[in-house]
């Protein structure tokens, strides 16, 4: 199993540009989520999904869109990038049961100029 | 709104010493409390976790102590090693949402 994969590893955007961060998992996990990690802020939940076709907002959803058309993929879209979205983004997945381990991807480092 | 408060922000421990990281929460509906370890440039990885009906869980050198009445839980790393130097995050889960603490950067001196 490849686990949770994320692409790209690093991206530089200009303010106002849009892009999609890709996330895929091959463990047949129902639950997938996106976090952003900023210094001193820990990991903050952006959006999450409990299955194909089902998504919901987390703590900091503004400026981001998600969709879940398949169990495997959970892309995160930045509609109009802003410098405040400069961060490291992590995707995670798990089975949707209490006590199940949440597996994180390697992260995407995003710089918005 | 930070629902899980973690302390200290950073910690320096001598090799062989005990590292202790504390977390406090407010929401009594949380039903799962994992700790994650993160090395630079990597994603967090689950270290150990506990459910609120258990007061302590031990896995090797790592122990979680859980105090439900005080709404606090802590990670103890016994016989700390330089390889334990990393950032540690506590978290709490309610239904499908995880809330993370702000992290503790641990450095173990050789």
Image (cartoon, rainbow, N blue to C red):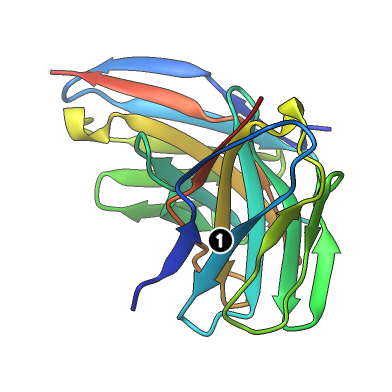
Residue A25 as seen in the image, left or right of residue A76: left
Q: Is residue B20 left or right of residue B17?
A: right
Q: Residue at x 38, y 45 (%)?
A: B63
- The residue lying toward the viewer, choosing from A82 and A72, is A82
Residue appearing at x 74%, y 41% in the figure:
A17
Could you tell me residue A3's position as x and y percent? 40, 71
Chain of residue at mark 1: A
Decide if residue B89 is on the left or right side of residue B18.
right
Q: Determine if residue B56 is in view.
A: yes
Q: Dividing the image into 4 quarters, which one contains the C terminus of chain B?
A: top left
Residue ID at (34%, 32%): B86
Q: Is residue B52 visible?
A: no
Q: Which residue bears the numbered disc 1?
A: A92
Look at 63% across and 68% down and name the residue there.
Answer: A32
**Percent x, y of residue B82:** 18, 27
- Residue A45 in percent (x, y) is at 71, 49
In percent of width and height, residue A14 lies at: 69, 32
Relative vertical location of residue A52 with respect to residue B76 in this rendering, above or below: below
Quadrant that contains the N terminus of chain B: top right
Q: Is residue B12 above or below residue B105?
A: above
């Amino acid at each position: 199993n490849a686990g949770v994969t994320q692409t790209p590893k690093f991206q530089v955007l200009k303010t106002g540009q849009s892009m999609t961060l890709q996330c895929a998992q091959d463990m047949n996990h129902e639950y997938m989520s996106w976090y952003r990690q900023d210094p001193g802020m820990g990991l903050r939940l952006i959006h999450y999904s409990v299955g194909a076709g089902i998504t919901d907002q987390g703590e900091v959803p503004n400026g981001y869109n998600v969709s879940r058309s398949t169990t495997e993929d959970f892309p995160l879209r930045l509609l109009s990038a802003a410098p405040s979205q400069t961060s490291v983004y992590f995707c995670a997945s798990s089975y949707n049961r209490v006590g199940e381990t949440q597996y994180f991807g390697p992260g995407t480092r995003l710089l918005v100029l | 709104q930070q629902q899980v408060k973690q302390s200290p922000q950073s910690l320096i421990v001598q090799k062989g010493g005990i590292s202790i990281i504390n977390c406090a929460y407010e929401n009594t509906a949380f039903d799962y409390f994992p700790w994650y370890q993160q090395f630079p440039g990597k994603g967090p990885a689950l270290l150990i976790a506990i459910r609120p009906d258990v007061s302590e869980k031990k896995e090797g050198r790592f122990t979680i102590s859980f105090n439900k009445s005080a709404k606090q839980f802590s990670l103890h790393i016994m016989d700390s090693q330089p390889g334990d130097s990393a950032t540690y995050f506590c978290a709490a889960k309610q239904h499908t949402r995880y809330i993370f603490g702000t992290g503790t950067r641990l450095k173990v001196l050789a």
